[in-house]
Every structure is written in C-alpha cells, then in structure tokens.
Image (cartoon, grey):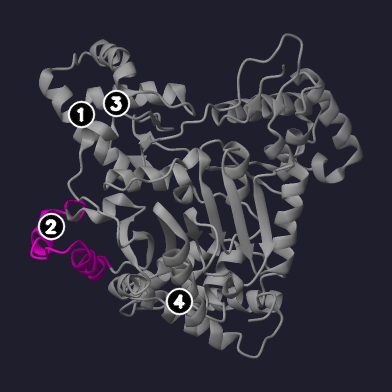
Amino acid sequence: MSDTLPGYDEIPYDSVPITETHPDRLAVIGRLFGLAAPDPARARILELGCAAGGNLLPIAFHLPGTRCTGVELSRAQAFAGAEACRALDLDNAEIRHQDILQVPLEGEPFDYIVAHGVFSWVPTAVQEHVLALCGARLAPGGVAYVSYNTLPGGRQRSMLRDMLLHHVREIASPQERLAGAREMLAFLATPLVETPPGHDWLRKELERLRSARDSYLYHEYLAETNEPVLFREFVDRAAAHGLQYLADTRLHTMFPSTLGADAAASLARFDELTVAEQYSDFLTLRPFRRSLLCRSSESLTREIDLDPLFALPLYTDLAPDPEGVFRNAAGQAFQVETPLLRAVVESLSAAFPRARLLEEIMPEASERAARSGHAPTSGDIRSLPEELFSLFASAGLQVTLCAPDPVSGAMSTGSGPRATDLARTLVQRGEHLIPTVRHQSLRLDPVSVRILPLLDGSRAPAVLVEDMIAAAARDPALARELPADSADHQREHLQKSVSGLLAQLERHGLLVALR
C-alpha cells in the first residue's frame, strides 16, 4: 500500500470519541462473560486506523495510567494527532504514521486492540493482518474490537454505493467526487408517481445522508474498498487466527427476546450463539456490527450473574423530558417505567458523570419512589436487577471498573472557570466536538467555540461576556452569531451562552477546580 490513503488527506475521517471502544466498556463486557479482562485504568491500548487521535487521546488524557498507541496511514491525520500529543504533553500516548501491514506480529502484548471503521474498507490482505495482529498480540484476558459492514443488510448500502460510484466514475478530485455524490443523491430523491419496491429503505437513507457529514458520505460510499461480510464468515476468519467471538458492544442485539416473542421462538432452535446471531442478522437485515474478540484459549461463560455486575459502580446521563420520557444527551429514548427503576436512574443521573454504587443509592432511591406514591415492595426490589440489566444492555446505563473521578469541582474563591486542557486545546485546533470524561462527544455551537478557549481560570463569567463583546466588535463572523439590534441584547445573549456552556462543561466533568 502507499504511505497514505486516497482522499483521506483531502477529506479526513472524523476523529471523535467512539464511546463503545473505551477500555472500561470493553473490560466490563469481558468480565460479564467470565473473561479476566485487564484493569482498564492501566491498560496497554492499540488503535489501528486511529485518524487524528480523536478516540485515543481522550483515553490517554483521562486515564493517565494507560499506554496508548495509534497507527494511521493518512499522513495528514497522523501528523495532526502526533502534534496534539505534544501540545497536551501526553507521555503515555503515541500516534504513528504507519501502514497496518507494517505493524509487526511480534512485540509487546496489548490489553485492548481497537479497529473501528477499518476492516470493511481495506483489502483482504489488510483485513487478515488486522485479525493476525489481534491473535498474536492480544494479552491474556485482552479484548479486541473490530467493526465492519455485514451481510445481508450491507447489500442495500452497496446498491446505493454502486449508483454513486457510477455517477462519479470519471471524476478524480475527492472534493469534486463528493460534490458529484451530493448531486446524485438529489437526483435519486426525485418524486415518483408510484414508489417501486425497495424505495422505502432508499428514501430513508437519502434523508439521513442529506445531513450526513462529508467524511461519512465520502468514506462509506465512495471509498475504493467497502466489502460487507457475513457475521459467521468473520467469526470463522477470526478463529483461524486463534480468536473467538466474545460479544457485540450492542449487547441487546445478542438477546432474541428484544426482537419479540415470535422471533425469540424461531431463533431458539439454534443452540450455538454465533449461529443464532447470524440468523438474527438475516431477520433484521443488519448492516453493521461491532464485534468483540478474545483469545480462543480463554474460557467464557454465557450464564450471566447479575449480582457481581451490579456490585460495581454505575452511572447514567438519562434524564426525563417534559413528557417524562427518559432520554440520553443525544435525545435517544429508553424504557424506564417502574417507579423504583426511575428513582434509581434519577439518583444516578444527579451524580453524573460520577459513578455510584447501587447499594449506596438504594435508600435515597427508595425514598424518591415513596415520595412519588410508590413505596418499593419486596417484589420491586427483586425485579430491579433484571430491569437494570435491560437498561445496561441497551446502553442507557453503564457499569464501570475504573470510575475515574471527573476533574470538575468547586472553584476557589475569586477564581474564574477553567476548562480542561484537552477541551481548550482541541477547540483551539478547530474542533467543535469535545470529548467528555465519559468518552462521549459534546457538540459546541459557534459562540461556545469562541468562549471555551477563554476558560483558562483568569476570567470571571462577567469578564468573559465583556471580552466576547469586544471580540465581536473586531470579528464580523462572531458578530453575525449575536443579536444585531442592540448591545444590551448582545450582552444578554452572551450571558446565557456563558452560563449554558459552563453548565454543560460541569455536567460532563470538563471544568477544573483551581488550586
């Protein structure tokens, strides 16, 4: 392969936190199935295809006991990630400009290996080397994460990909190919008198792609290689390298009951887990998987014991909306129905991003439920673990092994608010998505992007507002983001922006207590 990837320097792949790849998440799932997963707070982590380090660097920053290595073939992104390492003074992280094929099979073991957005988008030789690396360099108890497009659902995307590639077949420039793809998407949205078979999916995908990031459209639909595989084929290929299937990061997909009683009954005929999951893919036309692998020599259990799981600290960002539906920060709704479960979630959410033990919050949760007129019964308490597990499996609730305390806290008297070095550095480098303590992405509006670099501890909120007003007088682009009718309205708008940003940063553990 060349020393860079076609189009990746011109249209860089988004470099952001991928929540489910965090070593804490991987370790918890491993231990759920009996794997002695290494301590995520002191883990050795390898990320293949790490882009500019948007996923790896926040792990290194928030878990300083880890050792993080990233490999990236795009020269521009690898160099940007290495520069970010230097700017943040991260001596526990390294990003290399390197071809995956050149990563040796011999060398130090890694506790966690991550390959997100790589496997389906590279030639077969590179795919095999990814699996060989996992088989050769995964430490005992280690977990490898590999995402890939799957059959049969991937055929639908392949259909649209074929049309887009045909339309841009004579265009060489990545930016012009992207513009051509957008042009073709508009053509495909042309209304028809009658909707032909298959157009229901196509119209939904066209609507989704209308607001999709350029990097996603380009690298998913215009990449040189994008080959979906059957889940069973992936598992068999992994087995040839001494690996076995551990789980999917979307745990709920492993339980046929989530598809309904009829589907669960139909899938019950398959005794082997991987066979059942393959036929589940057939039923759901699943297009994408995030598979976890471990060494074939590891002994796993599929009988889940909830007691040790919920003896660990828990956290959640779920909160009820005005209609009482519990949603996460991204707006996704979750089933939180029984009074005791709602009370537990409310108690955990009030502490977010910190984690708390279930036994510690049960008294206050019981009191919350009682105040709502539903004093918990013994039956409510007995059913709580299964309700919590359902929420955990659907990613509405998280269990943690390392539970690092967020860096936020009460500020010293007379000091101004200070954001973390990571947040301020990334914003200064042009990022609008900021990684949180819990490895989520916090999207900033244009005004907040201008405010955050000023949060260095030297300015009180009132001073921040005045500094922003002065900046708007010099910068027409910033002025366009503010009310144009009067200085008073500008000031009021900025006061709300500053207070709103500080609340967001505090909620997500991104404010530092000055000492």
Label 3 neighbour load within 10 Å: few <14, some 14-19, many 20+: many
Judged left or right of residue 217, residue 317 is left
Query: The magenta stretch spans which residues?
Result: 257-284
* Label of residue 384 in the image: 1
Q: Earlier in the sequence, mark 3 or mark 1?
A: 3
Identified by mark 2, the residue type is Ala
> In front here: 146 or 173?
146
Residue 300: x percent and y percent? Answer: 24, 52
In this rendering, the answer to whether 465 lies above or below 453 is above
Q: Which residue is mark 3?
A: 342
Label 4 close to label 1 by CB (< 8 Å)? no
Identified by mark 3, the residue type is Arg
Residue 70: x percent and y percent? Answer: 61, 58
> In front here: 43 or 82?
43
Q: Which residue is mark 4?
A: 128
Residue at (37, 36) in percent of width and height: 399
Q: Earlier in the sequence, mark 2 or mark 3?
A: 2
- Disc 3/disc 1 C-alpha distance (Å): 10 Å
Identified by mark 1, the residue type is Leu
Q: How many marks?
A: 4
- Disc 4/disc 1 C-alpha distance (Å): 44 Å
Label 4 neighbour load within 10 Å: few <14, some 14-19, many 20+: some
Residue 96: x percent and y percent? Answer: 68, 62
Identified by mark 4, the residue type is Glu
